[in-house]
Amino acid sequence: MKKKESATNPLFYERKNFWKEAPSTERQAAMDFAVPYKQFLNVAKTEREAIAYTLDVLHKHKFKAFTDKKKSHRVYSVFRGKTIAIAVLGNEPLTNGFNLVGAHIDAPRVDLKQNPLYEDSSSAMLCAKTHYYGGIKKYQWVSTPLALHGVVVKTDGSLVDICLGESEDDPVFVIPDLLPHLARKEQYTKNIGDAIDASRMNLVFSGMVEAGSTETEAARAYALKLLNDRYGISEHDLLSAELELVPATPARDAGLDSSMVVGYGQDDRICAYAGLMAVLDNLDAKPKRTMIAYFSDKEEVGSQGNTGAHSVFLQDFIGHLLDLKGETNSAANLRRTFINSQILSADVNVAVDPNYPSVHDRQNAVLFNYGVGISKFTGSGGKGGCNDANAEFNAKVIRTFNDAGVFWQTGELGKVDEGGGGTIAYILANLGAEVIDCGTGLMGMHSLYEMCSKADLYSTYRAYKAFLLAD
Ligand code: MN
Ligand code: MN
C-alpha cells in the first residue's frame, strides 16, 4: 500500500526506471546507441586512440582544426595528441559564456617501464617490467590477456604506432599469477591490496632464442631482433616510448537481456562518447551559446601536466574562439567568458553494486537503468577536495533535463566516510564557471570489465545533447 501511494504522490521525488517508462522508440534507440559505442571502446583503448577516433568523426562532419586556413563554425584543437577541445560556435558573443561537456579519455592501465626488458635467470624467460597508471586493483591485472598499445618515438622524432594483441591472430601478453597451490604464504596471509606486489607485475614477454645461439642474453637478442624487423626499433627507442597494457578483450553485451555493456575504459570514455555524439547530433540546431566538448588526459593521476585539465590548453582554446568570434582575446574577456559559462563535468558515477550495497547510501546513489547521474558534489570525507555545485545551477540542469524528457537521478559516490573520489569539476569551477558532475553509473569501475546499462548510456547522451543547447 505504502509503495503504491509513493509512486503517485507528486510531492515525492521518485526516480524513473527507463525500461518501464520510456516509449518503445526510445527503448530501441537505447539499444541501437550501444552498437557503435562498443566499436568505439574497442578502437579507443588509449587516450591517443580516443583522439584518433574523434578526429576521424570530426573530419567526416566538416570540423576544421584551428590551424586550417578555411574559417569554420565547427572547430577543434588537439594538444600533444592526448587532449582535444571541440567547439560549434553559437550566435551569441562568447563572453556571454559557453556550454561545455568535459570528460576524460585516459583510463587506469599498466604501462611498460622505459627500460623494460630483462632476461629472468630463474625462469629463463625474457620479461618486461611494468609501472601501473591510476587507481587499479593490482590483482585484477594478473592472469588475464593484455594487449600492448602505444607509440615509440625514436630519437630522430619519427613515431611508430604499436597495437599488438587486438586482432585474432595477434599474440597477447600475460602477467602470470601465482597458482593457489603455492599461494599460502606469498599471498593468502596478506591484505588484498598487498597480495600482488607491483614489482612482481612483470610480463612474460618472450622465450625463443636463435637456433644454436651462443649469446649470453639470447632471448633478449631474439626479441629485439623481432621488434626491429617488425617496427624498425631498437631497445634505445623504448626509452622514449609510451606503451600501455590494456585488456585484450573486446567490449560486448552483458546480461540475458543484453541490456548492459561490459568493456574496458568506460571510465570515462562512456561520457566522452556520449558528449561527442551529443555535439554531432546538435549540428543542425544553430545554437545561441557556443557548444564545447572537452576531453582531458591524466584525470586518473590528478589531471596534472600539459594534457591534464589543470593545463592552460582549454583557456588557450577559448582565447582562440574569442578571436574567431571577432571578440577581443584579452585576459579580462577570457575570465568573463568562463564566469558566464556552464559546464557538465562528464565523468562516471558508481551504481549500486548488488554484492556491496553497504558502501552506498542507496537513496543518494545511482542505480542502473534510472538514467544519467547528477552529483552536486564529489570528494571524500567532509566533501574534501570537491566541487560543490551551486543549488541554482543544479536546479537549472534538472530543469533542462526535465524539459527534454531525459531520465536522470541524483547520486553521490558512496556512503559518507566510505571513501570517495574526484573529477575535473573543481578545476574548471576554479575558473569561475558553473560546474556540476553528471555522468553514467558504472559497476566494477576501474576494473578490466566495467559495466554500464544501455539505458543510462543513452540517457547520458540525451542529457548532454539537451544541456549543450541550454540557454
Ligand atoms: Mn573518471
Ligand atoms: Mn576513474
Image (tube, rainbow, N blue to C red):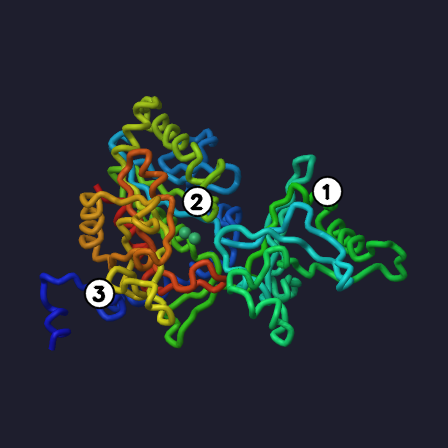
Name the kind of residue labelled 1 in the image: His
Closer to the eye: label 1 or 3: 1
Q: Is residue 14 left or right of residue 142?
A: left
Based on the displayed image, in which of its 4 quarters is residue 372 positioned?
A: bottom left
- Name the residue tied to disc 1: 236
Relative to 72, is 354 above or below?
Answer: below
Residue at image position (75%, 64%) is: 123
Q: Is residue 35 visible?
A: yes
Alpha carbon of mark 2 to alpha carbon of mark 1: how far? 36 Å
Q: Which mark is residue 16?
A: 3
**Crowdedness near tag 3: few (<14), some (14–19) or many (≥20) residues, C-alpha within 10 Å:** some
Q: Above or below — where is 446 with respect to 113? A: below
Residue at 31% from the left image edge and 44% from the top image edge: 387
Give 327 or 189, whichever is nearer the viewer: 189
**Disc 2 marks which amino acid?**
Leu
Q: Tell me where residue 21 appears, x and y as whole percent.
A: 22, 68
